[in-house]
Amino acid sequence: MKTTIILTAALAMSCLCATAQDEKDTTSSRLSIGAYGEAVMTRNFYSQSFNRYKQPENYANDKSHGRFDLPHVSINIGYDLGKGWSFGSEIEFEHGGNGTAVEIEAEEAGEYEAEVEKGGEVNIEQFWINKEFMGGKFNIKAGELVVPVGYSNSHHEPDLFFTVYRPEGEATIMPNTWHQLGISLWGRLKDWKYEAQLLSGLNSESFSAENFVHYGATSPYEFKVANNYAGAVRIDNYSVPGLRIGLSGYYGYTFRNTLRTPGAKYDDVTGALGIVALDFTLNRWNWIVRGNVDYARFDDSDVISAYNQANWTHHKYQDGNPHKYSNIGSNAVAYAIEAGYNIFSQIPKLADEKFYVFGRFEHYNTMASGTYASMYKYAKKYRCAFGVNYSPVKQITIKGEYSYRFFEKPNNHGLNSDSPLYKQPYNNEPSISLGVTYCGWLL
């Protein structure tokens, strides 16, 4: 009898443990945890003065300067909730995040004071719920979404570009990584992937001459103002083996998307912003070739520039003013091409590793046209980069790069060589960068 009881108890315990293990395995299979990030070092062989474009002759012989940085460190957590429902999130620490601490200041009669310990940002770049229909052919997603306009926003992980830092042109003229609250319809039909989003509009008070609409998606408040709405679309085609071609666009009003109320004379001003972008990736024959072309049009740029300048004059003595109050171009452009060849593909013993030698050329201009374009000729930049990407395992890439940023020479026809207008107006900007990146799923 005693033996029977012991066997029965042991069997029950075994079944209970097996059930608990099955539930644990099921939970683990539904949970996904991923991460990506970059740690980099750069030596810039040009001046770091903020006046280097206004008075370039004063900074031609400045010493080089170095930087260590964590540009992006992101943690992704997702969970399959069942019945076609899923959850996804991404929290990103830019430049190592930020930190503050409360200290008692002996030099200030023992007052409590909040000190900024380090720079950087912490952002929730994704936080959404998704419902899948028809086996993924049709999905509805709502929450904080990545806006997939341009190559760099839809492919921002560090193993999807050769350079140490994210592609410079697109990251300058557009928000990057661009993320906003909204709703998305997306899916895949055979060789086509599509997405359409409804979002809050950008804020033209945060546009600038040197960064165009880059800061327009940010908000200094505990919420994002949504007086205006916008739409974004993207379509990718995979019909040709190894080739992806993507077309994306954005359109929305940007003026009045703030807590400030303009006067009646601005009733007809909308600040309509339109962006169209074409990009591709070819991954075949041991080559990876990527390219993009981006064009943006901003209406009412002169009126809004004057409005921003007037607000700057009125509010310039207020502490903590978050807006740029800058002149803005009516058009911005960016284009780039990069290509890399995997040398280890020719060495059978190293077939499990990858070693790409790459080159990249890009051009971008945040003031491609507009009344104030002549004031910001340095906004028209070119950049060449050459380097290597070594991946000992799939998730890790070690990058090295020489970069040369340069500017267009002036038209010297009819000018004497002694004329100050004859020489190139800005100092070129070479640099060397090294980086190590991780991108992969941990669970």
Image (cartoon, rainbow, N blue to C red):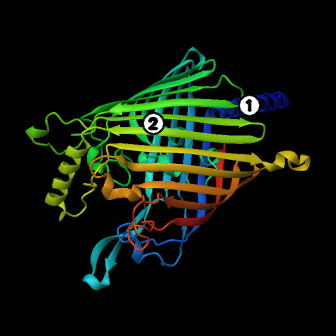
Q: Residue furthest bottom?
A: 107
Neighbor class of circle 1 (other Cα within 10 Å; few <14, some 14-19, many 20+) is few
Looking at the rendered image, the quarter that the N terminus falls into is: top right
Q: In the rendered image, which residue does mark 2 sit on?
A: 147
| Lateral position of residue 82 relative to residue 393, left or right | left
SS for dot 1:
helix
Q: Amino acid at mark 2?
A: Val
- Name above or below for residue 112 compared with residue 83: below
| Of the pair 12 and 189, the residue shown nearer to us | 189
Q: Amino acid at mark 1?
A: Ala
In the rendered image, residue 189, in percent from the top left (x then y), is placed at: 59, 17
Q: Is residue 164 visible?
A: no
Residue at horizontal 57 percent and vertical 18 percent from the top: 137
**Pair 2/1: label in front:** 2
SS for dot 2:
loop
Report, in whole angstroms, how far the alpha carbon at label 2 lies from the one at label 1.
44 Å
Q: Residue furthest right?
A: 349
In the rendered image, residue 331, in percent from the top left (x then y), is placed at: 36, 42
The numbered dot on residue 18 is 1
| Of the pair 168 and 198, the residue shown nearer to us | 168
Residue at horizontal 57 percent and vertical 27 percent from the top: 236
